[in-house]
């Protein structure tokens, strides 16, 4: 059974930083592109970032480019999202997702391509 377990969410003041973690089990992590998608209250799900299975390719949405950094440690089956200079507009539930042999740019264009999703972790940003 595939499980994606997110952690690291919380409350931060604007301008602050958070790091999200997602640990995968039940799949061969080395063969999966990983990504982060967020959903703010009352809004549609929005692609945030993705990373290729080897870590050599990444993609970021325009609102987070230059502020967020995605990375992965295949030895720990974990993907990270470092979020800096957070704004209230970044407040959302952040979901981790996995796509077998996925390509970050394709996933950015169509997040519904992800095969597996986590339960999400809440990020709140106070102004």
Image: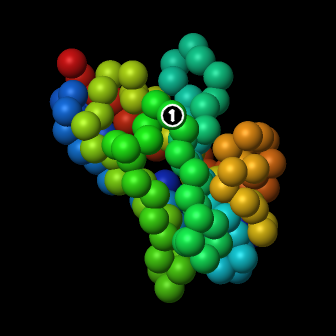
Q: In this view, does 104 lie above or below 31?
A: above
Q: Where is residue 114 in the image (x, y as percent from the top left)?
A: 75, 51
Residue 57 relative to residue 85: left or right = right
Looking at the image, is 96 positioned above or below residue 4?
above
Front residue of this view, candidates 31 and 59: 59
Q: Can residue 82 be seen?
A: yes
Q: What residue is at 69 percent from the left and 51 percent from the top?
A: 105
**Residue that badge 1 annotates:** 62
The residue under the point 39% across, 28% down is: 91
Which is nearer the eye, 78 or 108? Answer: 108
Whole-percent x, y for residue 55 in the image:
55, 72
Q: Is residue 3 shown to the viewer in this render?
A: no
Residue 92 image point, x, y percent? 46, 30
Q: How many marks can you see?
A: 1
Residue at (20%, 33%) from the top-left corner?
15
Alpha-carbon neighbours of circle 1 within 10 Å: few (<14), some, or many (≥20)?
few
């Amino acid at each position: 059974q595939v499980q994606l377990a997110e952690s690291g969410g919380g409350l931060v003041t604007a301008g602050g930083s958070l790091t999200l973690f997602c640990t995968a089990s039940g799949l061969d992590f080395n063969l999966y592109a990983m990504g982060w998608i967020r959903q703010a209250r009352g809004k549609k799900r929005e692609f945030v970032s993705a990373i290729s299975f080897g870590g050599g390719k990444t993609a970021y949405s325009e609102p987070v480019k230059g502020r967020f950094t995605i990375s992965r440690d295949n030895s720990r089956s974990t993907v990270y999202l470092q979020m800096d200079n957070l704004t209230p507009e970044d407040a959302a539930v952040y979901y981790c997702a996995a796509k077998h042999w996925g390509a970050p740019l394709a996933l950015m264009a169509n997040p519904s391509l992800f095969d597996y999703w986590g339960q999400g972790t809440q990020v709140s940003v106070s102004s």
